Amino acid sequence: LIVEPLVLGAGGMLMYPASVLAELKRIAERSGTLFIADEVMTGWGRTGTMFACEQAAVAPDILCTSKGLTGGSLPLAATLATDAIFQAHYSTDRSKTFFHSSSYTANPIACAAALANVGIWNDEPVAERVAALSRMQAEKVARFNGDPRFENVRTSGTIAALDLSVGNAGYLAEVGPRLRAFFLDRGLLVRPLGNVLYLMPPYCVTSGELDRLYTAIDEAAELAGDGR
């Protein structure tokens, strides 16, 4: 059973409570199914805790992590597994080997970046920064609660998302490319998922920079309403 804890990015930044994740874990255990947590996006503080699974008090059998592993500086991924799964493949018998590799496996530069990032998590108040950003996101996106131009205003830790109310909604909504161009013209890197606007800023973002982003979202809604 493969799940993306708390957030479903590819589906339009859909969010669900930790209780759902806990129930999925219970279902997997009852059926003897491995529980695989895809924390490529949600790990490293993105949902407010180091890993989203912590909020459901569950431990996956296999955990996939990337992106924040290096602080976003270089591409690197790591797959973690329980000792039981590791031991099942740890053998001199080649038929038991879990064959997997790629051209850049264990790239030393990327691994060095990951180690440096882990050091920052250990030595600096990253958790406090994540908590502060989570509060800022919740406070600033709240300006659109009850705004008829938007639907489903939501946050999960440092992630904020809202749906622009348009007739042609969905991942391939026609407004998507226009919104992307609108933000780029203003020097803002925002990638709409169709009519869904979402913000996943770096943890060093300032309150003023977030204000600039949310002001642009307000302006973008007017543009979409004018049909331009």
Image (cartoon, helix red, strand yellow):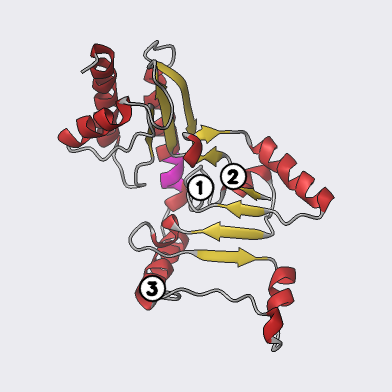
- Residue nearer the viewer, 53 or 221: 221
C-alpha separation, residue under disc 2 versus residue under disc 1:
7 Å
Question: x, y percentage for residue 168?
Answer: 39, 20
In this view, 71 is above or below 198: below
The residue under label 1 is 42
Q: Residues within 10 Å of mark 2 (few under 14, many from 20)?
A: many
Q: Earlier in the sequence, mark 2 or mark 3?
A: 2
Q: Residue at x 81, y 55 (%)?
A: 32
Q: Amino acid at mark 2?
A: Pro
In screen coordinates, is 143 left or right of 181? right
The residue under label 3 is 112
Q: Which mark is residue 124?
A: none
SS at mark 3 in the image: helix
- Residue nearer the viewer, 38 or 93: 93
In the picture, residue 201 is in which quadrant? top left
Q: Residues within 10 Å of mark 1 (few under 14, many from 20)?
A: many
Q: Residue at x 68, y 54 (%)?
A: 59
Q: Are marks 2 and 1 in contact (CB under 8 Å)?
A: yes
Q: Residues within 10 Å of mark 3 (few under 14, many from 20)?
A: some
C-alpha separation, residue under disc 2 versus residue under disc 3:
27 Å
C-alpha separation, residue under disc 3 versus residue under disc 1:
22 Å
SS at mark 1 in the image: loop
Q: Which mark is residue 5?
A: 2
Q: Please count the marks in the image.
A: 3
Q: Residue at x 43, y 52 (%)?
A: 126
Give the magenta part as a residue range. 128-132
